[in-house]
Image (spheres, rainbow, N blue to C red):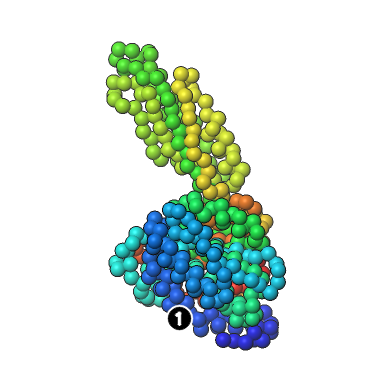
């Protein structure tokens, strides 16, 4: 292990030394990623997820972390690990999840294997490699400085793939106590861009109650819920604005009972995506203020925004700039990307804590049979994370 004195020379020198250090740790990194993959941990299996959190806790304890489990009734216990630092500065929060979308028994058909410079396995990209990067970056900082340069909190949840209902509040509480949040979700694309913006996501259900009548005998007495819903969908669809990043999709409709009955009820389920908290509030207000065209029909709107957008605000931009500076020291032009999907980074950015996402591994096929990471990208991802823990 290099002595810390190797790292007090010039910046460029130190960055090259660091890259060299992580290259020398690459095999150990791969081995740990495989250990994590070989403990299957689907979101919907508490005993399996609990085995995973216990195993990860032990790994982080070996590098000086103090693990603490947050009991979850229906999911695996969420894992918080605290590391003290030399200073009393605010901690940086390293955020991730150890649940995967793969059911138990996937491993035999998708074993952990290396092929053509890529490591394959269920959950390798999303995000067992990301957890491993946290572990090795913390270990490295301790070996370089003797102790961590600041306090660090690691928080790994077990329900991210199913909406984070049981971990969200803890994530937000920990973020509020932190100077910044670094999310180890996969990088965007094979160029390895970090994610500086994510869209927000919401789900709404619009139910129309009409008045039923015989379509032949009493057509004038009926007030069709289907006709009313159709007119409402035309109104709702006007909110689509691809240029400003708003999309509204009534993806499911149902209603009516028979062709000879004027429909008493009709329902639309609507997926919405927004780029800013302001758009989220505006769209929410619009949906809740819908008025019936037919006064004898009633409208009920349920649901709401699940994840607020991660906006590229000043805090996010400043973190990205720091990341670019670190990358530049090894001649790496680190790109940024805005993506449509949400992560727990949306929660922490949504409450105003500077957040940088997509700091994890580079690869392809998240949630698919060909999920893999590019092995040669690991050392510089670890270098970037270690640098951000120091400077974020
Ligand atoms: Zn993920």
Q: Quadrant of the C terminus?
A: bottom right
**Residue 85 in sight from this viewpoint:** yes
Above/below status of 36 relative to 235: below
* Quadrant holding the N terminus: bottom right
Side of 115 where 316 appears, left or right = right
Q: Does 15 sit left or right of 192 as displayed?
A: right
Q: Position of residue 199 (x, y in %)?
A: 53, 50
Kindly indicate the quadrant of the structure image that contains residue 2: bottom right
x and y percentages locating residue 215 in the rendered image: 31, 17
Element class at badge 1: helix
Reply above or below: 53 against 21. above
Identify whether 214 is placed above or below 256.
above
Q: Give the residue displayed 44% in from the left and 31% down from the top.
A: 207
Q: Is residue 126 visible?
A: no
Tag count:
1
What residue is rendered at 38% in x and 17% in y? 222
Label 1: how many residues lie within 10 Å, few (<14), some (14-19) or many (20+)? few
Q: Nearer the viewer, residue 213 or 319?
A: 213
Determine whether 327 is above or below 176 in the image. Answer: below
Which x, y percent locates residue 323?
62, 68
Whether label 1 lies within 8 Å of ligand 1 gets the answer no
Residue found 62% across the figure and 87% down from its top:
3
Which quadrant would residue 250 be assigned to in this image?
Answer: top left
Q: Which residue is mark 1?
A: 27
- Image quadrant where residue 154 sits: bottom right
Q: Position of residue 62 (x, y in %)?
A: 52, 76
Q: Residue at x 31, y 63 (%)?
A: 105
Which residue sits furthest right?
Answer: 88
């Amino acid at each position: 292990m290099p002595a810390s004195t190797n790292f007090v020379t010039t910046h460029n020198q130190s960055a090259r030394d660091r890259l060299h250090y992580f290259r020398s740790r690459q095999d150990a990194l791969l081995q740990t990623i495989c250990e994590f993959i070989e403990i299957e941990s689907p979101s919907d299996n508490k005993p399996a997820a609990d085995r995973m959190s216990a195993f990860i806790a032990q790994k982080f304890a070996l590098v000086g972390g103090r693990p603490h489990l947050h009991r979850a009734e229906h999911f695996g216990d969420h894992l918080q690990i605290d590391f003290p630092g030399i200073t009393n500065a605010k901690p940086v929060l390293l955020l991730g999840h150890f649940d995967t979308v793969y059911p138990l028994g996937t491993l035999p058909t998708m074993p952990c294997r290396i092929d053509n410079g890529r490591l394959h396995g269920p959950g390798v990209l999303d995000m067992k490699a990301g957890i491993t990067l946290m572990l090795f970056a913390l270990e490295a900082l301790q070996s370089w400085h003797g102790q961590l340069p600041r306090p660090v909190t690691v928080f790994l949840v077990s329900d991210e793939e199913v909406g984070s209902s049981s971990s969200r509040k803890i994530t937000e509480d920990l973020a509020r106590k932190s100077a910044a949040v670094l999310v180890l979700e996969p990088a965007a694309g094979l160029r390895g861009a970090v994610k500086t913006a994510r869209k927000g996501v919401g789900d709404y259900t619009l139910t129309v109650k009409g008045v039923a009548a015989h379509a032949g005998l009493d057509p004038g007495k009926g007030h069709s819920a289907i006709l009313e819903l159709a007119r409402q969908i035309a109104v709702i669809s006007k909110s689509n604005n691809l240029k400003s990043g708003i999309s509204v999709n009534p993806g499911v409709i149902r209603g009516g009972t028979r062709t000879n009955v004027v429909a008493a009820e009709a329902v639309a389920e609507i997926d919405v995506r927004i780029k800013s908290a302001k758009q989220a509030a505006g769209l929410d207000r619009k949906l809740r203020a819908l008025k019936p065209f037919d006064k004898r029909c009633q409208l009920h709107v349920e649901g709401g925004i699940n994840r607020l957008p991660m906006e590229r605000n000043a805090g996010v931009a400043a973190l990205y700039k720091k990341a670019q500076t670190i990358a530049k020291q090894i001649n790496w032009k680190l790109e940024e990307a805005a993506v449509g999907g949400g992560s727990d980074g949306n929660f922490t950015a949504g409450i105003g804590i500077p957040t940088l996402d997509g700091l994890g591994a580079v690869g392809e096929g998240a949630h698919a049979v060909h999920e893999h990471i590019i092995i040669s990208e690991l050392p510089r991802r670890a270098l970037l994370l270690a640098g951000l823990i120091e400077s974020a």
